[in-house]
Image: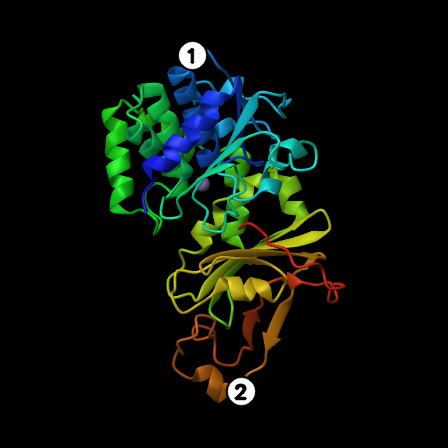
């Protein structure tokens, strides 16, 4: 269901009644969070020149997005005053802002708020909620909003909004890339969005440390008996490559590219925990259920978990008799078909979290 004009008008009533507008996105901001933060803030400045519009995020902006016009104006936590209103973008729930503890007035109804989001499980925590689960991204909703209200989208704002559509659809490759997404992209390009700027920064730029870390991930891929492509990175890998944890994001797509797998997984060690990211391309595999076994969660095709512990690599050797070793190649990718017939066939198991079962960690959802 597209955005309703009544919702757009309800948002206008909140903004009209306020002196200042605090626009807020979630912690650990991605392209959609930052694109929608800048996009709606700039649109509001254009439409309400007499109001003070400020942009906030508890985390600083990642280098990848420093090309976005106006990004340097984003500041950390806001100071909420009487007469303010707040607009939350791309926030699936209050705690993702990290302001729920420090700024209760933004969540208890004292300050009127507008929530613009596309996450289906958004609890609609605003005074006015523009929640459109069918939208690929929050930026796509903001384009709809601007068109409903007959607001112009100048080139700089179009570049911000296009960035969010690109990043949340993985460069128009994910299954959420509907015909509406293509229409939105065409509309933004007509408005002068600088798409090569976005493509180069988001999809064609990687730090040396990131490439080195990904090299380790790719080198260590093993195929498990259950049909999983699994890799793992240790604290030592992070130290040796100089990469931080955030640089692992995206590597899973390469592990997931091994043909014929039921699922793919990257295990990573961080701060005494082992984090797992799981993906699948198959309809008949539910990785959220797999992650659930380790107190994690997520979606059917992308999920994750975190367990206390460390990674312990393990090598398994299997002794087979001559007849078996000489048998024609089986369908199993680890069969020793090319080994001389009298050799034992090596089967390398994937590294597994080596800790004893954790003292039942509280159920949590690990974003994937
Ligand atoms: Mn989003």
Which residue corresponds to mark 1?
A: 49
For the image, the number of numbered tags is: 2
* Figure quarter occupied by ligand 1: top left
Q: Splitting the image into 4 quarters, where does residue 58 fall?
A: top right
Which quadrant of the view contains residue 6? Answer: top left
Front one among 245 and 65? 65
10 Å crowding of disc 1: few (<14), some (14-19), many (20+): few
Tell me if residue 6 comes above or below residue 336 in the rendering: above
Identify the residue under disc 2.
321
Res. 101 image quadrant: top right
Where residue 268 appears, as percent x and y from the top left, is 61, 51
Q: Position of residue 359 (x, y in %)?
A: 76, 63
For label 2, the crowd category at 10 Å Cα-Cα, with few meaning under 14, some 14 to 19 and many 20 or more, is: few
Q: Is residue 222 visible?
A: no
Tell me, what colour scheme is on the image? rainbow
Q: Viewer-proximal residue, 326 or 289?
A: 289
Above/below status of 211 relative to 149: below
Question: Could you say where residue 246 lies in the image, as x and y percent from the top left?
Answer: 57, 40
Q: Secondary structure at mark 2?
A: loop
Q: Could you tell me which residue is drawn at 73 percent across and 51 percent down?
A: 272
Tell me: 345 left or right of 253.
Answer: right
Residue at image position (28%, 25%) is: 150
- Sequence-wise, the earlier of marks 1 and 2 is 1
- Note whether ligand 1 is within 8 Å of mark 2: no
Q: Nearer the viewer, mark 1 or mark 2?
A: 1
Identify the mark at residue 29; answer none if there is no mark. Answer: none
Where 270 sits versus 225, above or below?
above
169 or 333, nearer to the observer: 169
Q: Residue at x 46, y 47 (%)?
A: 119
User: Which type of secondary structure does the marked residue at label 1 adopt?
Assistant: loop
Left or right: residue 10 versus residue 292 is: left
């Amino acid at each position: 269901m597209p955005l309703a004009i009544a919702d757009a008008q309800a948002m206008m009533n909140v903004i009209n009644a306020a002196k200042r507008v605090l626009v807020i996105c979630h912690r650990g901001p991605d392209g959609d969070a930052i694109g929608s933060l800048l996009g709606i803030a700039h649109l509001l400045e254009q439409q309400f020149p007499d109001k003070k519009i400020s942009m906030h995020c508890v985390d600083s902006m990642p280098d990848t997005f420093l090309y976005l016009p106006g990004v340097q104006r984003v500041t950390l936590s806001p100071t909420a005053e009487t007469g303010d209103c707040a607009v939350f973008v791309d926030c699936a729930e209050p705690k993702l802002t990290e302001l729920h503890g420090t700024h209760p007035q933004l969540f208890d109804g004292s300050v009127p708020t507008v929530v613009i989001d596309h996450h289906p499980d958004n609890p609609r925590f605003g005074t006015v909620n523009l929640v459109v689960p069918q939208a690929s991204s929050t930026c796509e909703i903001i384009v709809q909003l601007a068109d409903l209200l007959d607001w112009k989208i100048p080139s700089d704002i179009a570049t911000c909004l296009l960035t969010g559509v690109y990043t949340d659809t993985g460069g128009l490759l994910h299954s959420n890339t509907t015909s509406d997404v293509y229409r939105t992209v065409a509309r933004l390009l007509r408005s002068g969005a600088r798409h090569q700027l976005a493509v180069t920064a988001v999809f064609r730029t990687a730090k040396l440390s990131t490439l080195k870390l990904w090299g380790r991930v790719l080198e260590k891929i093993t195929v498990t008996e259950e049909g999983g492509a699994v890799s793992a990175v240790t604290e030592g890998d992070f130290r040796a490559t100089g990469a931080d944890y955030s640089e692992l994001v995206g590597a899973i797509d390469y592990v997931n590219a091994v043909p014929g797998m039921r699922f793919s997984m990257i295990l990573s060690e961080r701060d005494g925990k082992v984090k797992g990211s799981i993906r699948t391309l198959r309809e008949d595999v539910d990785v959220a259920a797999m992650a659930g076994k380790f107190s994690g969660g997520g979606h059917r095709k992308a999920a994750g978990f975190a367990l206390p512990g460390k990674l312990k690599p393990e090598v398994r050797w299997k002794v087979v008799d001559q007849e078996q070793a000489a048998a024609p190649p089986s369908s199993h990718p680890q069969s020793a078909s090319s080994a001389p017939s009298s050799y034992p066939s090596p089967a390398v198991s994937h590294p597994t979290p080596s800790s004893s079962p954790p003292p039942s960690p509280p159920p949590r959802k690990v974003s994937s």
